[in-house]
Amino acid sequence: MKKAEATRLTILQKAFELIYVKGYQTTSIDDILATTQVTKGAFYYHFKNKDEMGLAIIHEILKPTMAEAFIAPLQNEGDPLEFIYEMMEHLLIGNPFLKPEFGCPAANLTQEMSPWNADFSAALNELAKLWEETLMEVLENGKKNGFVRNDASPKQITMMVISGYWGIRNLGKLDKGKESYLLYLKELKRYLNSLK
């Protein structure tokens, strides 16, 4: 990797970590410069402004990370209901980066930026739609392969899973702990078992 590419990647990664903890609007370019130890000139060499950097974070950091954590675990042969539970358990309990007090990076950006920035809204909606479509597809395949009840609606299950995840992440931010996650996972397991 060339030096310029490495500098750009460092800016994106460090800015993403700062934004996850502090929020997008309260993270300044000066905060990013202090953390990355790059010059203002180097920042503006790579990005016209903070919003261009923010969109690059969504496309180049958040999207691949979500694909690895939210999409890949579902693309195995077997029972999609088990894969959904295992994925949620890992996201809530096992993932060392995702802290209860900071919530979900994608949900945070959606809540903070979608109301006033159409480009952020479109990019974040693309991420959400990818997860939604993947869940519905694996659940539909689960029905065909006998893992999911025939009368179950992949769309309704998907909405329950996604809204449950985003909701429990917000409760975790308030609780600053994983107790609510454990209660959610227990109920999620019961719900998913009822769909077999």
Image (cartoon, helix red, strand yellow):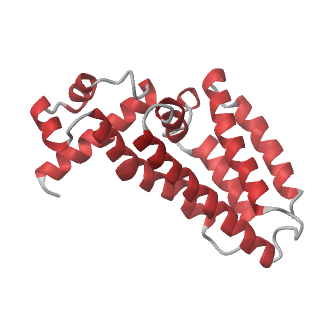
Quadrant including the N terminus: bottom left
Q: Position of residue 152 (x, y in %)?
A: 85, 63
Q: Say whether residue 156 is left or right of residue 45.
A: right
Q: Position of residue 86 (x, y in %)?
A: 68, 55
Q: Say whether residue 57 is left or right of residue 188.
A: left
Q: Which residue sits at x=67%, y=47%?
A: 162
Please indicate, yes or no, whether residue 12 appears anywhere in the rendered image: yes
Q: Say whether residue 50 is left or right of residue 185.
A: left
Residue 163 drawn above or below residue 84: above
Q: Say whether residue 9 is left or right of residue 150.
A: left
Q: Which residue sits at x=20%, y=38%?
A: 48
Please indicate, yes or no, whether residue 39 appears anywhere in the rendered image: no
The mark total stands at: 0
Q: Position of residue 99 (x, y in %)?
A: 54, 33
Which residue, as the protein is rendered here, is positioned at the far bottom?
Answer: 145
Q: Which residue sits at x=63%, y=57%?
A: 132
Q: Which residue sits at x=69%, y=35%?
A: 168
Taking depth in this image into account, of 39 and 59 the one nearest to the observer is 59
Residue 33 drawn above or below residue 81: above
Quadrant including the C terminus: bottom right
Taking depth in this image into account, of 159 and 83 the one nearest to the observer is 159
Q: Position of residue 108 (x, y in %)?
A: 52, 33
Taking depth in this image into account, of 122 and 130 the one nearest to the observer is 122
